[in-house]
Image (cartoon, rainbow, N blue to C red):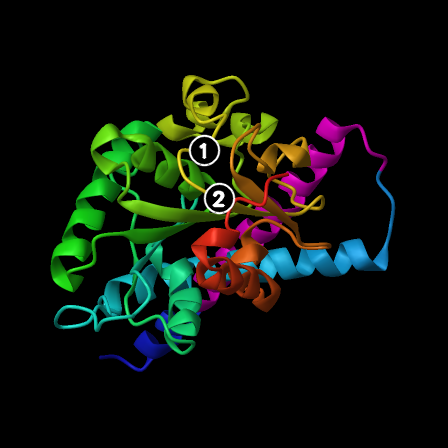
Amino acid sequence: MSPAAPHGLVAVLYALLGIALAGTAFHTLATALVNLVDRGEPLRYRRQGVARLFREWGAHLLVPVAWLAGRLVGERLPAGPLPEGAPPPVILVPGYGLPRGMMLLLAAWLRRRGWPAVHAVDNRPRSAPIPVLATHLAAEVDRVRRLTGAPRVDLVGHSMGGLVAAWMAARPEYRGVVRRIVTLGTPWRGTRLHVLGRRRQARDLAPGSEVVEALREPPVPVTAAWSRTDPMISPPEHALPAAGDFEAVHLDDLAHTELLVNPRAWRVVRDALAAPEAEEGAGA
């Protein structure tokens, strides 16, 4: 290798880093501005809002790292059936365009707090309607149940992943298989910002879409974590189901992707998964 080669490699790495910084910054800022325009809110300088913008930018910067981690880190499921009395397996479903690696921090956090079987999935195929993504999720659920011997599972979905989980749980053959669903920033009633999506599933995120209308009342008890400052859900109240057995948990001053890396959101997931079944469905 010539002496100039290392310098060339460093230049390429710097260029890629610059592209990542600029691209994620543009996405974060553009989404926030579109959200303000869509909600009809004036643009005002607030230190709290700027801090939230930078936190969301930081969360977006993790996506390339998470993509790589999702390919290098294998699944961490037990080698045999779960012991008696163990909590059900938890399957984590990422949101629109996000890799399973974005769920690995939450997965590790839950394992350290007593959940022996936590499995993150990718949404496959990459560009497909939500019902097709739900079919892939169903295959993963079946595989986890075979490996662990567990009759039921819990599902945790971020953003679009919550709708994928709910669509699967609503299928007749999975009635009774899914115990509960926890969602983080899921557009249960759709979001007007679906127009920014280029993949096929973005159409299913539109208010009034066939998928959104079919899931107006969730098929199982739901804990829906949401935030009025979530820039991807417009209007923000659409992060809650329209009816049915659900509990709403508001997380003040959190953005969208940030929900995946914020300990406050993780604690909501933990508490929802640990709640006795008799206490589910508090309603809203």
Above-or-below relation of 191 to 176: above
Q: Which residues are magenta?
A: 13-42
Residue 222, disc = 2
Task: Give the crowd class for mark 2: few <14, some 14-19, many >=20 residues within 10 Å.
Answer: many
| Quadrant of the image containing the N terminus | bottom left
Asked whether the viewer can see residue 281, the reply is yes
Asked if residue 15 is among those painted magenta in the image, a careful observer would answer yes
**Where is mark 1, residue-wise?**
218
The amino acid beneath tag 2 is Val
Asked whether the viewer can see residue 18, the reply is no
Above-or-below relation of 86 to 46: below
What main secondary structure does the magenta stretch of the protein show?
helix
Above-or-below relation of 115 to 38: below
Residue 37, position as x, y percentages in the image: 75, 30
Residue 76, position as x, y percentages in the image: 24, 70
Q: Nearer the viewer, residue 218 or 59?
A: 218
Asked if residue 267 is among those painted magenta in the image, a careful observer would answer no
**Residue at left offset 13%, top offset 61%:** 147
